[in-house]
Image (cartoon, coloured by chain):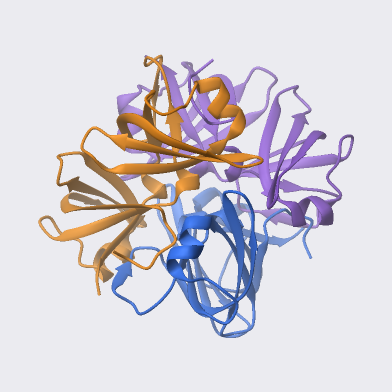
Chain colours: A orange, B purple, C blue
Amino acid sequence: MANISARNCFSGVVGKVETGPVNARVELTLAGGDRIVAIVTHESVEALALVPGVAAMAFVKASWVLLLAGGEKIRFSARNHLPGMVVSVEKGAVNSDVAVRLTGGSVVHAIVTNGAVLELGLKPGAPASVLFKASHVILGVPA
Amino acid sequence: MANISARNCFSGVVGKVETGPVNARVELTLAGGDRIVAIVTHESVEALALVPGVAAMAFVKASWVLLLAGGEKIRFSARNHLPGMVVSVEKGAVNSDVAVRLTGGSVVHAIVTNGAVLELGLKPGAPASVLFKASHVILGVPA
Amino acid sequence: MANISARNCFSGVVGKVETGPVNARVELTLAGGDRIVAIVTHESVEALALVPGVAAMAFVKASWVLLLAGGEKIRFSARNHLPGMVVSVEKGAVNSDVAVRLTGGSVVHAIVTNGAVLELGLKPGAPASVLFKASHVILGVPA
């Protein structure tokens, strides 16, 4: 495990890599088959040697994760959208830390406002999806 | 209303779309005339069929919004900068949830540190602007 | 000082600027010699006249900063990675505000979960690095 404050860490294998002049789009396929998309700088792709087939990790801070509840009424631009079930809600004064177990087994933490917890009916056992932008994913490889 | 934890949801019509190899820049004109700029993946523009004239929504998590108070001493790279007035401050142990009513009428929520609330004099009635990066905006279209 | 809620403000001089069709990569060299990398829109580079040699500021919200503790076991895609030492931890119900003094003297604030504070052993005097993505940096120039 990495010594990093990010609460969400996914291990996988790099898939397709598309490179532009500034940024690059990198796919990571997780053990359970889920796919995570990351936008990182072109520079990072080279520095970390991110090519198809290498093992890599994806880190996502809990405050960068959005939660969705109920049926799909909207399609989102955010490239990472994984379904699951709420397993715990730790409530603070303004925000709550909501843990969602994904279909593949990973647990994802999201920091959302208490207002959102109430409106979306987020409580253990409730279905919920996690949503995060590709540009909010940090990739890592063993040093 | 979307079943999403993001506290800030703007409805509008897609304007100019500029596409690069990895990312695209999408303008959204709100009912009140305000303009929001989003950077999303090229892939999302195609998947959501984001072309000029279609209705779309922009979602911005409260923790991705910065607040500005007082006169303009600095010009920022963040493409979204909307003026308004503080309508409420809900204080937690570390962070506060500050609601700002924009000139156009929309209310935007920002989670900022209690230190910032104090330093900027954020209280109901005080003028404040909201600031967020184009790369922090998630776009959505009806499913 | 800017009237902005972002807890982290760095002053420096613009170095290399690389421009793509949508985004641009801008380097900022701080007084102490540290280098910060920002991804902003191509439009911002032009609007703010960001060219090598001009003075500029970088703003990073505390909730966009990750913390690393212990030896380096992983190399990250995030382009900004600055070593330092924890100087204070202000604990809330869910999150803590951790202040890290960088080698160059600047103090950086990070909002991380209480779970991370515990696991990483973040307390005054402990070594820690701050990590943030180039796409999470906002640049500013005097108005």
In depth, the one of B17 and C82 nearer the eye is C82
- Asked if residue C60 can be seen in this view, the reply is no
Residue B92 lies, in percent from the top left, at 71, 45
For the C terminus of chain B, the image quarter is top left
Residue B141 lies, in percent from the top left, at 43, 19
- Asked if residue B56 can be seen in this view, the reply is yes
Which quarter of the picture shows residue C90? bottom right
In depth, the one of C72 and B137 nearer the eye is C72
Rendered position, B122 above or below C130: above
Q: Residue at x 30, y 70 (%)?
A: C75
In depth, the one of B130 and A125 nearer the eye is A125
For the N terminus of chain B, the image quarter is top right
Residue C61 lies, in percent from the top left, at 61, 56
Q: Residue at x 50, y 22 (%)?
A: A120
Q: Residue at x 68, y 61 (%)?
A: C7
Residue at the extreme right? B125
Q: Residue at x 79, y 65 (%)?
A: C1
In depth, the one of A62 and C90 nearer the eye is C90
Residue C104 lies, in percent from the top left, at 59, 84
A42 displayed left or right of C82: left
Rendered position, A141 above or below A126: below
